[in-house]
Image (cartoon, coloured by chain):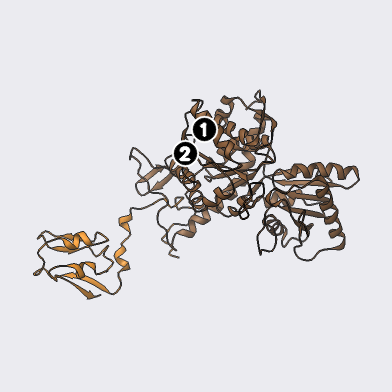
Chain colours: A orange, B brown
Amino acid sequence: MSSSLPGWKELPMAGVAFRPSTDVKTGEWRLGFRPVVKEERCVGCAMCVVLCPDMAMGLGEEGRAQVNYDYCKGCGICAKECPYGAIEMVPE
Amino acid sequence: MARVEQKRLGMMGDEAVAYAIKQVEPDVVAAYPITPQTIIVERFSDYVADGEVRTEFVAVESEHSALSACVGAAAAGARAFTATASQGLALMWEILYIASSMRLPIVMAIVNRALSAPINIHCDHSDAMGARDSGWIQLFCENCQEAYDTVIQAWRIAEHPDVQLPVMVCLDGFVVSHTLEDIEVLPDEAVKEFVGERKLVRVVGHAGDAFYRLDPTGKEPLSMGTFAMYDLYFEYKRQQEEAMRAALRVIEEVGHEYSRLTGRYYGLIDRYRLEDAEVAIVGLGSSMGTAKEAVDGLREEGIKAGVLRIRSFRPFPMDAIRGALKDVRAVAVMDRAMSFGGPAGPLMMDMAAAFYGLEEGPVMVNYIYGLGGRDISTDDFKAVVRDVLKAAEEGVKGVPVRFVGVRG
């Protein structure tokens, strides 16, 4: 196992979180496809923001959908549900 | 600590446990009644209703909830106690592992009773054996006095910074729980002083150094029992094993400290007439009292017999057992539970492991007895001793398992 992780003598007991959960970049689990926003089609309705199960969707400065790839697992719900066809799943 | 003046009271085992818990006065007691544990909960709820303790008594709807409430209370930094038996312990199974792996120093009395089916309310050790690998310390008591004393000691063992594990105090259903005995009790203040306040250990969490508890003030935020995959889970299990090894030492330390106060010492094992013994009975719980009586009789007949009662079943005191039996040539290992389809009863499997690979060790025979409360007499124990001596003379192969008191 990775030597960068603490051994049993150093690890705080009982599954105590020893770093914030946001340190774990779950976007690393993404398999195959990533959502890409077509800015010209996005109207900023935020449907994808509401539906994203990982809170990896937000609205950018322009009020357009923006993906946080650190936490996006590539499930594709945003692309499937976008009423304007503004999100495309693109091979990694 | 100097010896304190003690009072002599007549109490059943269950009452003795309730009385000890009254003196300890934990923050939370959450329990559900089940025969033969009921009297513990009844008596304690009387103490609460009469205003004798300030404990928060949670009358839950099941044992699963009882232990879950204790987990929550202990995680918040409280002292939490519960008690159960048989089916109730079986229903707690899921939460047993959560309590121990979250390193919560809960104390629970188990009034040992057989498991269904057929339904049976009397003593055997099947319930506790089902929790054998759950990560709880398991201390088996012989009588009401020891049940009282062990319930007091249990807090010090559970809460020791090197241990931080929950403790089961096991007493035999009816034989101890419902049998009146004269016991010596400490004054309330002496118990309170001995157990002290629960000292929380400190851990380094995601926001830095913190007491190991869910901080209601939010000043020291902590997440416990979080997600751990193949990259971390194993290390937590290794820590639990280390805590069990530390408990071997702590059980004895706490025992010595308690004996200075009371004159009564209990450690990992209880040796009875083993100094010059050639043959020994090894077992758990109240029937070892009967075995001691049988040994006295055998000695009058010239048979050098002794008893090794194992008080701490988890952690299993391998070194102490080997030392106590080093000059004994024949050992009768008494199991009041079965491991169906296994090589022997649960205690025998551990005893066989304790001597495995050593150049010298006693001949051992496993005797299954007393299931569902079937009585075992001094004559039965004498017959067992003669049987194991014969086996030692004739030699045995493997792990022989024999049944005592079952009709053929």
Side of B64 where B332 appears, left or right: right
Look at the picture and state if A32 lies above or below B359: below
Look at the picture and state if A21 lies above or below B4: below
Look at the picture and state if B80 lies above or below A28: above
What percent of the width, then of the height, locates residue A75? 27, 68
Crowding at dot 1, Cα within 10 Å, few <14 / some 14-19 / many 20+, comes out as many
Q: CA distance from mark 1 to mark 2?
A: 9 Å
| Residue hosting label 1 | B45
What percent of the width, then of the height, locates residue A11? 45, 53
Look at the picture and state if B348 lies above or below B138: below
Q: Is residue B204 visible?
A: yes
* Residue under disc 1 on the same chain as residue under disc 2: yes
Q: Which of the pair B67/B249 is nearer the observer?
A: B67
Q: Amino acid at mark 2?
A: Ala
Crowding at dot 2, Cα within 10 Å, few <14 / some 14-19 / many 20+, comes out as some
Q: Which of the pair B358/B137 is nearer the observer?
A: B137
Residue drawn at x 84%, y 46% is B276
The label shown at residue B59 is 2
What percent of the width, then of the height, locates residue B260? 66, 30
Occupied quadrant, residue B183: top right
Q: Which of the pair B165/B34 is nearer the observer?
A: B34
The label shown at residue B288 is none
Determine the chain carrying the residue at label 1. Answer: B
Determine the chain carrying the residue at label 2. Answer: B
The reply to whether discs 1 and 2 touch (Cβ–Cβ < 8 Å) is yes
Q: Secondary structure at mark 1?
A: helix
Residue drawn at x 51%, y 25% is B52
Side of B387 where B229 appears, left or right: left
Q: Amino acid at mark 1?
A: Ser
Occupied quadrant, residue B191: top right
Q: Secondary structure at mark 2?
A: strand
Q: Give whichever of discs 1 and 2 has the lower sequence position.
A: 1
